[in-house]
Image (cartoon, rainbow, N blue to C red):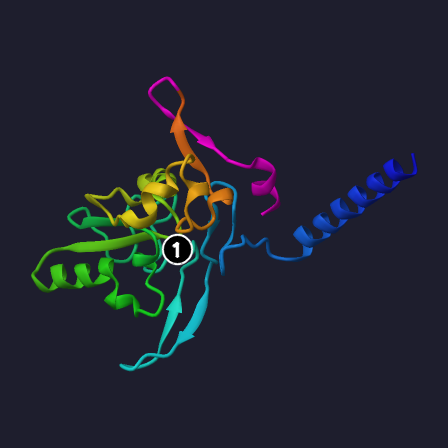
Amino acid sequence: MRWLVLAVVLAALVSVAEGVARALLPVRAYMLGMVYDPDLGYRQPLLETIDCPDPEGSFSFRTNSEGFRGPKLPGAEETLSPDTLTPETTRLLFLGDSFLVGWGVPAEALIPFSCEAELLARGHAVQAFNLSFSGIGTAQELILFRQHVARIRPSVVILVLYPDNDVVDNTPELVGLTTVSQGAYIRPFLVSDGRGGLETLWLHPLRAALR
């Protein structure tokens, strides 16, 4: 009986400590620098600024108000960006992981914005949007796409695929057999619902909830 009481008391103390930590501290995923997201598992912090040294000149790594590198996305109630988007603008939507986040790379040198600059220089009316977080797989990228596609209304969607881990990141049967898939137990997987659609699977719901 004494051990049962002790176990109940310890469980209560852990629950209280967890509640206090969640109330007072930012909820961090175990992936370095990531923060908790209820749909994606984790994401880049919002409005982050990091000073980065570079042989060609120091620069600031910045994320916008939704955690992406690049311009702010069109508002939820806006059909077009108030800045440069016009009905004639070709909207380029890039989806990917760390290759598009580009740690250590100035924003203008990233694939989306170097592509945008080249097309603008050739006289094309374009604007690039960058939906990417480090360490995510294409299942999470599909979730991001569904969240933001109505706001961006892309003319073209470019998926940047990294075969080394993106296939594993989408395959629950493989994640425990490799070291290349970080965050496997706190990322959502999209699996068949048996009716031609997809449903979300968390491999370890309790582990995911504690993050």
Q: Is residue 181 left or right of residue 207?
A: left
Residue 161 location (% of width, % of height): 26, 48
User: What's under tag 1, amino acid-wise?
Assistant: Ser
* Residue at figure coordinates x 86%, y 36% from the top left: 4
* Residue at figure coordinates x 32%, y 41% from the top left: 167
- In the depicted structure, whether residue 50 falls above or below residue 35: below
Residue 53 location (% of width, % of height): 37, 79
* Residue at figure coordinates x 78%, y 42% from the top left: 11
- In the depicted structure, whether residue 197 falls above or below residue 155: above
> In which image quadrant can residue 2 be found?
top right
Residue 191 location (% of width, % of height): 40, 29
Residue 93 belongs to magenta span: no
* Residue at figure coordinates x 52%, y 42% from the top left: 38
- In magenta, the rendered stretch is 194-211
Quadrant where the N terminus is found in the figure: top right
Q: Is residue 53 visible?
A: yes
Q: Is residue 210 left or right of residue 96?
A: right
Residue hosting label 1: 134
